[in-house]
Image (cartoon, rainbow, N blue to C red):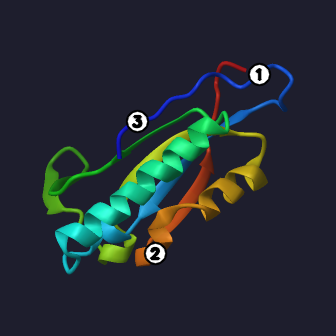
Amino acid sequence: MEAVMSEPVGEDQAPRSTFMLIFRGGAVSRPDLSPSELQAHVEKWYRWSEELAGRGRRNAGTTLDAPGATVRGRDLVTDGPYAESKDLVTGSMIFEAASLEDAIEVARGCPTYEFGGSVEVRPVQDYRI
């Protein structure tokens, strides 16, 4: 998924906090999907991200590619990560929301559920405060 940004929310809007959506599993972890099924699903992601931007929710996201590696300490690097495909982190998105509840509502619209994916919603700490 390519990053999408929109104009800042107007000053008359509720104060915004930054949240991260962490995507696990879903279509990108499914080797059984045809290229046309995967393309149709990716298009849903683009529409979802564009809709968020159109509603004034600046967002930036990316998918993760494979393979990766896991570093455990300075001396141990292994291929992987090798978790169940439904648990693999497949991407993330940073966006603004008025509250955790508002961020959860955004996550509910995510296309990942179509193929059994899940979304973790986390507030991003702002150390400038």
- Residue pointed to by mark 1: 10
Could you tell me if the residues under marks 2 and 1 are in contact, i.e. CB atoms within 8 Å?
no
- Residue 15: image x %, image y %? 81, 30
Which of the 4 image quarters holds residue 70?
A: bottom left
Q: What element carries label 3?
A: loop
Kindly identify the amino acid type of the residue bearing the numbered disc 1.
Answer: Gly
Report crowding for label 2: few under 14, some 14 to 19, many 20 or more residues within 10 A (C-alpha). Answer: few
Report crowding for label 1: few under 14, some 14 to 19, many 20 or more residues within 10 A (C-alpha). Answer: few
Give the Cα separation between the discs numbered 3 and 2.
21 Å
Q: Is residue 72 visible?
A: yes
Give the Cα separation between the discs numbered 2 and 1.
33 Å
In depth, the one of 105 and 118 nearer the eye is 105
In depth, the one of 123 and 4 nearer the eye is 4
Name the disc covering residue 117, or none.
none
Quadrant where the C terminus is found in the figure: top right
Kindly identify the amino acid type of the residue bearing the numbered disc 2.
Answer: Glu
The residue lying at 18 percent from left, 54 percent from top is 68
Earlier in the chain: of badge 2 and badge 1, it is: 1
- Residue 86: image x %, image y %? 37, 75
| In the image: residue 52, left or right of residue 114 | right
Earlier in the chain: of badge 3 and badge 2, it is: 3
Q: Is mark 2 on a helix, strand or loop?
A: helix
Name the disc covering residue 3, or none.
3
- Residue 16: image x %, image y %? 75, 32
- Residue pointed to by mark 2: 114
Report crowding for label 3: few under 14, some 14 to 19, many 20 or more residues within 10 A (C-alpha). Answer: some
